[in-house]
Amino acid sequence: MSPTYRPFSVLVLIAGTILLLGCDGDRAMAPETVDRPALATGLPANPSTKEFKFNLIGVPRDKTPTMTGDQGKRMFVKLWGKSTINLQEGPFDILDANATDNNGGLFQLPDPDPDDDGVTSYGVWVRTVGTPHRSAKFTSCVEGDPDGAGGAAPSGEYCSLETVTVERGTGKPKVYNVSQELLSICADTDGDTKCDKRIFLFDDDGLDYLWYYDNSGLRNAQVWFFSIPQTIGLNP
């Protein structure tokens, strides 16, 4: 039998096809790596290094179910008006996620200044997201006798003169350092409308600590905690 001859162009086509398939196979076995831009959060550190993070979710109607010990990292607050967030010392945790009722929510966080030197062991940042042109105001307060038994200041509620308003503007979400305003209270204890005493959270076991969250339509405020010391100082 005489040999079969194939045109040269056909042989080239077959070889090229084999080579092409080989290249495709190589790409399948060695996937490309794509450089991705860093997440532009505006936070002071990589989000993965946070100590704790939870969301304050503004809702138009008060919540009725019991939300104690539900393990969620969010707390519901009024979409319009003032909500109470009671504070308790301990590892970061949300113990009552409903701040829309008369009892308020309950958030647990560590003593920010265990050495009583005015330098906190961590800081707090708030990142506002959601619908633009909305805001909320934080105020830290203590209830009890700020001077202790027999002190000059009467027992009562003392709210910090250092409040902070966080806003959701247009464009990228903004991040606020609220460490000083949320971890300490600059109180007026003598009634002259001036701050005369700085009280850090959990300085005195005889005092009750809380945050007021006065919302003006802000649907989501992310509260972040990072192990970044903040120098606040002991003086007002």
Image: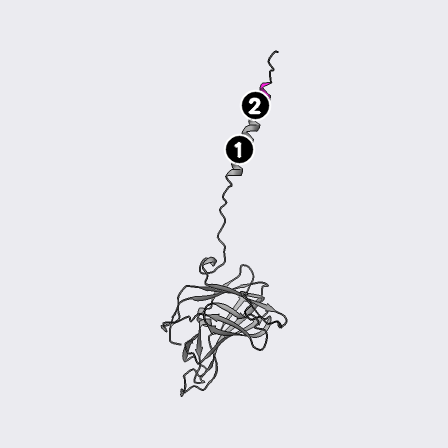
For the record, the magenta segment spans 6-11
Q: Which quadrant would residue 216 be assigned to in this image? A: bottom right
**Does the magenta segment cover residue 7?**
yes
Circle 2/circle 1 CB separation < 8 Å: no
Side (left or right) of 159 relative to 67: left
Position of residue 82 measured from the top left corner of the image (x, y, whole percent): 57, 75
Q: Residue at x 54, y 38 (%)?
A: 28
Give the x, y percent position of residue 223.
50, 66
Q: Is residue 223 left or right of residue 196?
A: right
Residue 2 % position (x, y): 61, 11
Q: Which mark is residue 23?
A: 1
Magenta span: predominant SS is helix
Q: Quadrant of the C terminus?
A: bottom left
Expressed as whole percent of the image width and height from the top left, the position of residue 215 reads: 57, 71
Task: Describe the element under mark 2 as helix, strand or loop.
Answer: helix
Residue occupying the point 45% across, 71% down:
90
Instruction: Please report whichever mark, 2 or 1, sits nearer to the chain's N-terminal start.
Output: 2
On the rendered structure, is 227 left or right of 214?
A: left
Give neighbour class at mark 2: few <14, some 14-19, many 20+ (Cα, 10 Å): few
- Residue count near mark 1 (Cα–Cα under 10 Å), binned few <14, some 14–19, many ≥20: few
| Closer-to-camera residue (174/204) | 204
Circle number at residue 196: none
Q: Nearer the viewer, residue 67 or 176?
A: 67
How is the model colour-coded? one colour
The residue type indicated by label 2 comes to Val
Amino acid type for the residue under numbered disc 1: Cys
Secondary structure state at the residue bearing disc 1: helix
Asked which quadrant contains residue 8, the reply is: top right
Is 73 or 142 nearer to us in this picture? 73
Identify the residue position indicated by label 2 in the image. 12
